[in-house]
Amino acid sequence: MFDFLFFFNSILIGIGLAMDAFSVSLANGLDDVCMPRRRMLLVAGTFAFFQALMPLLGWVCVHTMVEAFSAFEPFIPWIALALLGFIGGKMLYEGIKCRKEGCPDCNCKEGKALSLGTLLVQGVATSIDALSVGFTISEYGTLEAIVCALLIALVTFFICLGGIYIGKRFGTALAGKSSIFGGSILIFIGIEIFVTSFI
């Protein structure tokens, strides 16, 4: 049941699913170069939670209501595009507005911290396409599906932590432009999810 191939495949799935979350974590690090360690763990943990939850939900849907899930699946790319486009557009607008108004070239401003609402929207937007993974693990038993989801969460957590660290490092170097760059990344990821779903 739990052989090498199971763990290897689960880790590979985790790496593949975490790429969008990594990019958004990078954007968050760019946008808040003074993000404290506790918030970094919260951000990475949120992405890990949703990346594990969505495949499990997909697995449950496959085993309970396949027809309803199949009807919902075409809307997944549109939802991801709308959510990431909105958040990215907001970051872009704030970055451009700040540069026009001559804000200080520092991202350590009070109130800069990522809100919980925005973080949850990012978590859903970057993981919603992982619902489809429920089809690829449909032959797993309940315990196997849960262990697979936990491995995906673990991989995502560490990849996202790395993304935040890299974003913070480059955010310091890109002071004053990092919100624009971070917003652009989010919009690009939304478009990428949308376009690749039709290829």
Image (cartoon, rainbow, N blue to C red):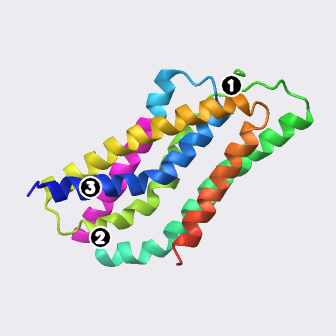
Position of 9 compared to 159: left or right?
left
What residue do we see at 40% from left, 48% from top? 50
User: Of marks 2 and 3, which one's residue comes earlier in the chain?
Assistant: 3
Q: Which amino acid does label 2 sit on?
A: Phe
Give the secondary structure at mark 2. Answer: helix
Residue that extends furthest to the left in the rendered view of this protein? 1
Image quadrant assignment for residue 61: bottom left
- In x, y percent, where is residue 88? 68, 49
Q: Which mark is residue 10?
A: 3
Residue 177 in sight from this viewpoint:
yes
Name above or below for residue 124 compared with residue 31: below
Give the secondary structure at mark 1. Answer: loop
Position of 145 compared to 175: left or right?
left
User: Of marks 1 and 2, which one's residue comes earlier in the chain?
Assistant: 1
- In x, y percent, where is residue 14? 35, 52
Instruction: Measure the alpha-carbon separation of dots 1 and 2.
Output: 41 Å
Name above or below for residue 103 compared with residue 144: above
Residue 114 in sight from this viewpoint:
no
- Magenta stretch: residue 177 in it? no
Residue receiving disc 1: 111
What residue do we see at 46% from left, 40% from top? 160
Q: Which amino acid does label 1 sit on?
A: Gly
- Magenta stretch: residue 47 in it? yes
Residue receiving disc 2: 135
Instruction: Measure the alpha-carbon separation of dots 2 and 3.
Output: 14 Å
12 or 152: nearer the viewer: 12
